[in-house]
Amino acid sequence: MNKQTVFVVDDDEAVRDGWSILLESAGYRARLFDDAESFLEQFDTASAGCIILDLNLPGMSGPELQQVLIRKQVHLPIIFLTAHGDIPTSVQAMKAGAEDFLTKPMDGAALLACVRRALVQDTQRQKLLAQQGMARSTLARLSNREIDVLKLAVQGKSNKEIGKDLGISYRTVEVHRARILLKTSTSKLIEWSALAQASGLLPDR
């Protein structure tokens, strides 16, 4: 069963019910909220899926909720909905990472297409997080000195150059490299580079 959920936050009950019927008929799991505050009270930050968010909500507005989620490091794709074509607000929301910005009333098929794109994006995000977690767990087995050696090795430096940079002997570098191979269950330098990049130790190229 797909664990992704489409969260609908809209103060119009008819709109919420309509989106719920549409989403569930398309095979998606939907959760409905009439304001941002109730969404935040019940939302699990580890959730997967996307958010359909009304721009103009009573109390906390849609863009304000977006900023709260950013501060909480919640990065679910957000599809903003509004009855008014507010271009400056839409630009601001998109710059803050919104997936899409759509004007009501809108065609159901168009909304479902946006939801599909958002869920694909979230799936990719979840995979990346899992890869990062595994890589960080692997690199956590290394000592600080082994991390130093790994960083320099993936930069293409030879054992002699690494030894000179770290103030240790060539032989000591060889020992550290052997331990890195053992602890990370790798056999090639390119695997070290992939681990380092996935963990965030090195920037993506």
Image: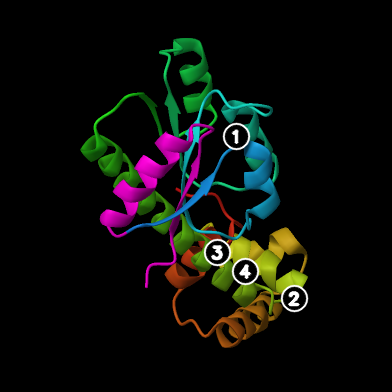
Indicate the position of residue 99 as horizontal and vertical percent values: 42, 36
Q: Is residue 161 left or right of residue 50?
A: right
How packed mark 3 is, by other alpha carbons closer than 10 Å (few <14, some 14-19, many 20 or more), is some
Labels 1 and 2 touching (C-beta < 8 A): no
How packed mark 1 is, by other alpha carbons closer than 10 Å (few <14, some 14-19, many 20 or more), is many
Q: CA distance from mark 4 to mark 1?
A: 28 Å
How packed mark 4 is, by other alpha carbons closer than 10 Å (few <14, some 14-19, many 20 or more), is some
Which marked residue is nearer to the observer: mark 2 or mark 3? 3
Which marked residue is nearer to the observer: mark 1 or mark 3? 1
> Which amino acid, mark 3?
Gln
Q: Is residue 103 in the magenta section?
A: no
Residue matched to label 2: 143
Q: How many numbered markers are drawn?
A: 4
Residue beneath the point at 49% across and 81% down:
186
Q: Residue furthest bottom?
A: 182
Q: CA distance from mark 1 to mark 3?
A: 24 Å
Residue matched to label 1: 66
Mark 1 / mark 2, whichever is N-terminal: 1
Provide the residue span drawn in magenta.
1-27
Residue matched to label 4: 136
Query: Dot 4 lies on which element?
Result: helix
Query: Dot 1 lies on which element?
Result: helix
- Give the quarter of the image for residue 107: top left
Q: Is residue 188 above or below residue 48?
A: below
Q: Which mark is residue 14?
A: none
